[in-house]
Image: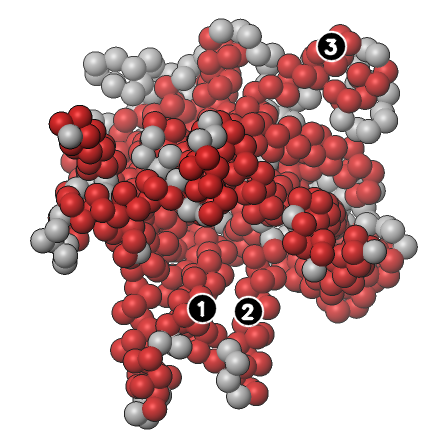
Amino acid sequence: MAVSAIAADSAASAAAPSRERWTFLVFLWRRPRFLVGYALVSGVVAIGLLSPWLAPHSPTDAESAAYLLAPSLARPMGTDVAGLDVLSRVIAAPRVDVTIALVSTCLAALIGSGLGAFIGLWEGRDGLRSAAAGFGLRVSDVVQAFPVFALALVLVAVLGQGMRSIVLAIGVVNIPVYLRIMRGQTLALRTLAYVEAARIAGAGDAYVLARHIAPNAMPVILAQMAVGVGTAIMLTAGLSFIGAGVRAPTPEWGAMIASGFQSVVTGQWWPALFPGLALAVTVLGFGLVGASLEAWSNPRERTKPSRREWLAFLARVKAARKSA
Amino acid sequence: MNVLLIAASRLVSAGPQLFGVILVSFFLLKLIPGDPAPMMLGPLATTEAVEKLRAEMGLDQPLPIQFGRYLERLAHGDLGRSWQTTNSVTKDLGERLPATLELVVLGLLLAIVIGLPLGLAAGRSPFGRAASAADLYSLGAGAMPDFWIALMLIYLFYATLGWAPAPLGRLDIAMAPPERITGSFLVDALLAGDFETARSAASQLVLPVLTLGFVTAIPVLKITRSAVAQLNASDFVRFAEAKGLAPRCVSQHVLRAALPQIVPALGPLASALIGGTVLVEVVFAWGGAGQYAVSAVLNADINAALGFVLAAAVLSLAIHLLIDLASLALDPRIRTA
């Protein structure tokens, strides 16, 4: 549909002829879907932070009398087989899930993009550096040859159960993702005229990386990080679901779904439904934030009209045709 | 000629790759704390008995020698023994891999049935209803963990409506598995002409396949959508549109032209699914290879875990070869090159 592609360009210029330099906020305002993502993420983080004051019951102390109570006014999400209040646990869980996801993603992004930048810079240079870059790439290939979940599981088994092991395992399996992205960005950026000019002026690797490559590659890395937080939450939940994650009474969505497993089969839906919903909402929020950053970092996407603007444009064209 | 060349180059590069995978997995799995010998003999075993068993299993040797011995046995086609099931790993995997493959193949097929048409429609009209639906689907379904979707399906179709059978394995408990030909209960029962067993096997398959298809459709959808969107601006599409061809007809042309881009992307997806069905297998007590590998890893059952890694690597190699051949058939540019 080449015609529509051309028309989309003109729609963009027709919709905003004067706004050549859109700020990020205006960009977001025109795409309310992305705003929803930011609202979800900040909501989940706020609830997690405030959970000790918001929770109606203790998230870790079971009341054996309150065994598998159905949702009611007093207990909006019911209780699970151990007599734990589901609502209190669901809102306490971001403290574990989001923390693990954020720390492991930052770890992976820092190490991965650092290595990727040097590999990108050194590829095709003199012997030793080129060899080091090639070796780094091979290692990352081998790591990526394993299924992500299986590798994370093995790493947790090696490191021993616990929060720190999960953070490390999820971090390590994600390093190659950032390594690949950063290497691609560096390879594309290092041939640009101003980077070569800096080189000729005598700039070293460190200067070029800090001054030219890092700032330009930042939006792409940030977009991947936002999406990565979502997948890290899923991975944490998956590990906990098969019993390789956090230890028993700790409130964590995956472990909660696992403890609600048998109840679901016998017809009590609430202990498994609510933690899954909370997890899905959180991952969705981070996914939308990632999508917004991705669109922002791509000039074509950034200036593309939103669906609503496009439909308004079509309506205008139709009206103009009619009057002509 | 070309076909043979491609197959040969795949096999040549496969050797070092397989060796690398075995090497890394062996030393990584050996790092898992836990000694199988005392676990096999139980808590009442004497120290001498444990030492004797360790010597028998070669566990008292340094790691490089253990690795050498493993390779030696592997060269004879012996994957060792799993201490959990006390069977040979080859036998265990032979029973469990078909169960996993059944899920992978059917799940992938369902994913293509959902993802391909939706991706095509979304890619053809970037601002249409299909595009909005595709956005919603990939964001929404992509945010839900597969094991949770599986549980919700069980609640709806088993616990509430009673349409689906109990999520307890591959066959109704009262039924005997059909005579083994391929290892897939559904196929074997059909081959044997036993339609009642086939029906039971099929009804057990419905929910896990729905779960996998629902989740795996997202990447299929994304790949198709971007491949189609790229073609939208090409000359032949403009020509077809200018000529006044019906949109349906143009879409068919676009799909055919996008296939050489879509099919290669299905290879990594299929290999990822072999390891990725684990959680769904656990929910449905499927007894597949993924579940076997997880319990092997959690119980320091090295031979079993290594066997699974090796089998998965060989399978993914076969898938890549298959995809290469399909690309050759689909893309005339590769054929003549």
Judging from the image, mark 3 belongs to the subunit labelled B
Image quadrant holding the N terminus of chain A, namely top left
Residue at 41% of width from left, 24% of height from top? Answer: A272
Q: Is residue B272 left or right of residue B321?
A: left
Name the residue tied to disc 2: A137
Residues at discs 2 and 1 in contact (Cβ within 8 Å): yes
- The structure's colour scheme is secondary structure
**Does the rendering let one see residue A287?**
no
Q: Which amino acid type is shown beneath numbered disc 2?
A: Leu
Name the residue tied to disc 3: B174
Name the residue tied to disc 1: A183
Q: Label 3: few (<14), some or many (≥20) within 10 Å?
A: few
The circle drawn on residue B304 is none
Q: Is residue A148 left or right of residue A248?
A: right
Extreme right residue here? B76
Q: Which amino acid type is shown beneath numbered disc 3?
A: Ala
Could you confirm whether marks 2 and 3 are on the same chain? no
Judging from the image, mark 1 belongs to the subunit labelled A
Q: Position of residue A262 (x, y in %)?
A: 50, 21
